[in-house]
Amino acid sequence: MKNKYQRLTKEEKKQAIKEYQQTEKGHGMMNRLTRLMIIGIIGIIYAIGYFIMEYTNYSLNLADLFLIIPLFLASLFFIIMAYKLKIKNLNNFVLKNKPQKNAKN
């Protein structure tokens, strides 16, 4: 089931993000979520780079895989959860601050 934020048009989504970032809570939350996203991307890049470097040197062993796989999965988890939290917070903001368009009489 889609939430209210996902049903908005592209312009309405941009406007909702802009309004949310202007609030004190929204500004802090978006900064934290951006930081989580950056940490996740750096972790994935590091894991892939480390895997390629070890694989090309033919020195990839089990200990390296015990480092690479959890790092990759944790980084992927950071990215997914940052996105989900962003959508959840924006949906709550839209529900609280936007009037219903199709109110029945």
Image (cartoon, helix red, strand yellow):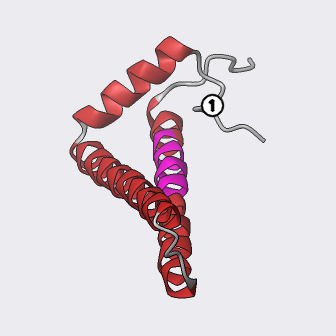
Magenta span = 79-90
> Would you place residue 7 above or below residue 54 in this image?
above
Verify whether residue 102 appears in magenta: no
Point out residue 6 in the picture as x, y percentages from the top left corner: 63, 31
Secondary structure mostly seen in magenta is: helix
Point 41% across, 53% down: residue: 45
Q: Count every numbered label the image shows and give the total.
A: 1
User: Label 1 amino acid?
Assistant: Gln
Point 53% across, 40% down: residue: 91
Judge from the rendering whether residue 88 lies leftward or rightward of residue 97; answer left or right. right
> Would you place residue 27 above or below residue 61 in this image?
above
Quarter-of-image position of residue 77: bottom right
| Residue placed furthest toward the right | 1
In this view, the residue in front, 29 or 43, is: 43
**Residue bearing the label numbered 1:** 6
Point out residue 85 in the picture as x, y percentages from the top left corner: 49, 53
